[in-house]
Image (cartoon, rainbow, N blue to C red):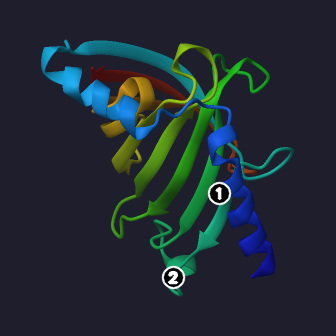
């Protein structure tokens, strides 16, 4: 508990000095005041999501499971927390654009599917400090779509779709490389 309290104190003290620029309430109010005159924008993003369970730089960890999960053919009840890098290219050594932070849970009893709840946190470039929120079903099919339900920073009032396609999967480690194409409507 002491470690958790210390981490929370660091988080609260570091908030104003983080790597992203967060506007104060006055700037947000001014933005909302101008909103009726704003035009919608469409932004298309492309990146690679590196989900690593083993090896160097593990980015997804198992945090919970049901007592029946081990017997389930679909891993029903298994939950992971992730902080996965988002990169420009296929290789994990290419430029990091941000992080996918959140959780996913194996939610299908009869078929393999996940519930995804994650923030795409952009940490470089023109979207630095902005986020997109993905919440939805991620079925076990080659190409999947998940809804964008919100965002912050550049992506305030975002809505859209995140299309994902598995590019690589290591059956021994569970490490995966997923290509994302995102289309977002925002102001």
Give the vertical position of 59 relative to 95 (above or below).
Answer: below
Dot 1: element: helix
Give the vertical position of 102 relative to 128 (above or below).
Answer: below
Q: Residues within 10 Å of mark 2 (few under 14, many from 20)?
A: few
Query: Along the horizontal axis of the image, is 149 left or right of 163?
Result: left
Say which residue appears at 61% left-offset and 52% top-offset: 82
- Residue 180 in the image: state x and y as whole percent: 48, 26
Q: Disc 1 versus disc 2: distance between alpha carbons?
A: 33 Å
Per the rendering, the mark at residue 73 is: none
- Residue 112 in the image: state x and y as whole percent: 41, 57
Task: Give the residue at mark 1.
Answer: 12
Query: Along the horizontal axis of the image, is 129 left or right of 112?
Result: right
Closer to us: 56 or 32: 32
**Residue that protrudes farthest toward the right in the picture:** 56
Dot 2: element: loop
Name the quadrant of the C terminus. top left
Closer to us: 44 or 30: 30
Please tell me in which quadrant of the rendered image residue 161 appears: top left
Say which residue appears at 61% left-offset and 31% top-offset: 20
Give the vertical position of 61 relative to 66 (above or below).
Answer: above
Say which residue appears at 62% left-offset and 30% top-offset: 98
Task: Give the residue at mark 2.
Answer: 66
- Residue 68 in the image: state x and y as whole percent: 50, 84
Please tell me in which quadrant of the rendered image residue 186 appears: top left
Please tell me in which quadrant of the rendered image residue 145 appears: top left
Mark yes or no: residue 29 visible. Answer: yes
Closer to us: 176 or 63: 63
- Residue 164 in the image: state x and y as whole percent: 44, 31
Name the quadrant of the N terminus. bottom right
Q: Nearer the viewer, mark 1 or mark 2?
A: 1
Mark yes or no: residue 144 visible. Answer: no
- The numbered mark, 1 or 2, whose residue comes first in the sequence reads 1
């Amino acid at each position: 508990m002491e470690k958790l309290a210390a981490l929370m104190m660091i988080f609260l003290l570091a908030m104003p000095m983080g790597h992203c620029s967060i506007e104060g309430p006055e700037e947000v109010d001014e933005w909302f005041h101008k909103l009726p005159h704003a035009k919608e924008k469409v932004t298309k993003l492309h990146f690679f999501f590196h989900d690593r369970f083993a090896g160097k730089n593990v980015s997804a960890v198992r945090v919970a499971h049901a007592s029946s999960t081990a017997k389930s053919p679909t891993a029903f009840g298994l939950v992971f927390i992730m902080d996965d890098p988002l990169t420009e290219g296929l290789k994990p050594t290419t430029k990091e654009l941000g992080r996918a932070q959140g959780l996913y849970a194996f939610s299908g009893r009869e078929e393999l599917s996940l519930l995804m709840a994650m923030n795409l946190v952009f940490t470089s470039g023109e979207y630095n400090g902005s986020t997109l929120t993905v919440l939805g079903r991620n079925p076990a099919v080659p190409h999947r779509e998940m809804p964008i339900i919100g965002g912050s920073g550049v992506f305030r009032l975002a809505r859209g779709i995140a299309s994902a396609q598995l590019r690589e999967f290591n059956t021994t480690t569970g490490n995966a490389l997923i290509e994302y194409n995102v289309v977002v409507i925002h102001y």
